Amino acid sequence: MIHFRLASILFAASCCVAPAAAQGMVQLTLSGEVDRTGGARAEVEVTFVNGNTNNEARTVAFGMFLAERTSAADLAVLLEKRFVSAGARAVNTSQGQPARGVTCLFIEDVLGVSLRLGQGLRATVTLSEDRPLSVRIVPPEDAKQDAILRVTASTWFPHERLHKRAEMETRLDPTLTTTRIADLLANQAIRSGWPSEVDRHETWLPGTTASAGVIEGASFDLITSGDWRLEIALAPRRQDR
C-alpha cells in the first residue's frame, strides 16, 4: 500500500491535472540481482493517470519476496506485466532481447513512484518530461547500509535558449531519521543553487528552478546495498504547460 504521506501529495497533484492533460514519462533503469542469501523483498509502486477510467489516478503496487539471484531483467518483466494489467502504459525495452546488465522500463502518465530495493538490486528513477514535486527518503529496514543519492536536473534557460544541468550528491547514514534526511537534502540543494523547502519535517520540496534554469526533468540515483525507500511525486501537468 502506498505510503500515506505520498498518497496525500499525489491526491492533491491529481486534483490539479486537467481532464485532457496527461502526466509525463518515468524511466526506471534497473540493474543487478538479489545477492542476499535466501532472497530479499522488493517493492515498487506507481501512481498513474488512467486514460481508460476518465483520467482517474490509480496506484499499482508490486511487493514480493524474491529468490536469491533474481535479476533486474526478471524484475522488469514482472513489473511490466503487473503495471499493464492494472491499466498503465509500460514498455520493457529489454524484453525479448539477449540478457544484459541494465534493463529500462518506461511508464507513461505517471504521478508518482516509490521503491524499496537494494540487497543487490538497484534502480535509477528518471523523470523524462517533468520536475519533481516532492522527494521523501525512508531509512532501510532489513539491510542497514549507507547510501548516496545523486540527483541530476535538466534545466532550460529560455533567454539563452540553452539546456544545462544542475547536480547534487548527498551521503546518507542508515541511523538518520526521515526528518534529518529531508533537512540534508534541502540544505544540499540550496547550496547547489536549487531553492528548496521541507514539508512537515520529512519531505523535500525541490523548487521549480535550479541555478536560475527552469527544471524540465530529473534523475534520482540511490546508490546503496541497503533497502532504503525512495518516494517521488511529479509536479502536476496542466493544459497550458
Image (spheres, rainbow, N blue to C red):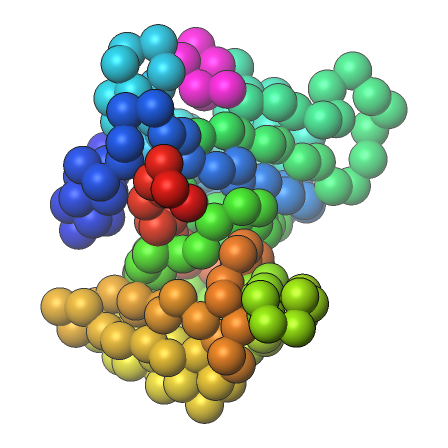
Residue that extends furthest to the right in the rendered view of this protein: 98
Q: Quadrant of residue 141?
A: bottom left
Q: Position of residue 50 (x, y in %)?
A: 34, 19
Q: Is residue 72 left or right of residue 180?
A: right
In the image, 220 versus 71, the foreground residue is 220
Residue that extends furthest to the front in the rendered view of this protein: 159
Q: Position of residue 201 (x, y in %)?
A: 16, 73
Q: Can residue 37 be seen from the camera position used here?
A: no
Q: How many marks?
A: 0
Q: Residue at x 53, y 72 (%)?
A: 213
In the image, 88 versus 22, the foreground residue is 22
Which quarter of the rendering shows the N terminus? top left
Which quarter of the rendering shows the C terminus? top left
Q: Is residue 57 above or below residue 228?
A: above
In the image, 88 versus 78, the foreground residue is 88
Q: Residue at x 66, y 66 (%)?
A: 161
**Does the magenta segment cover residue 227?**
no
Q: Can residue 80 be seen from the camera position used here?
A: yes
Q: Position of residue 207 (x, y in %)?
A: 36, 70
Q: Is residue 115 left or right of residue 100?
A: left
Q: Is residue 239 left or right of residue 54?
A: right
Q: Quadrant of residue 73?
A: top right
Q: Position of residue 57 (x, y in %)?
A: 26, 27
Q: Is residue 133 above or below residue 237?
A: below
Instruction: Point out the stretch of residues depicted in magenta.
Output: 82-89
Q: Is residue 107 above or below residue 30?
A: above
Q: Residue at x 70, y 36 (%)?
A: 103
Q: Is residue 53 above or below residue 157?
A: above
Q: Is residue 5 left or right of residue 167?
A: left
Q: Residue at x 59, y 32 (%)?
A: 106
Q: Quadrant of residue 140?
A: bottom left
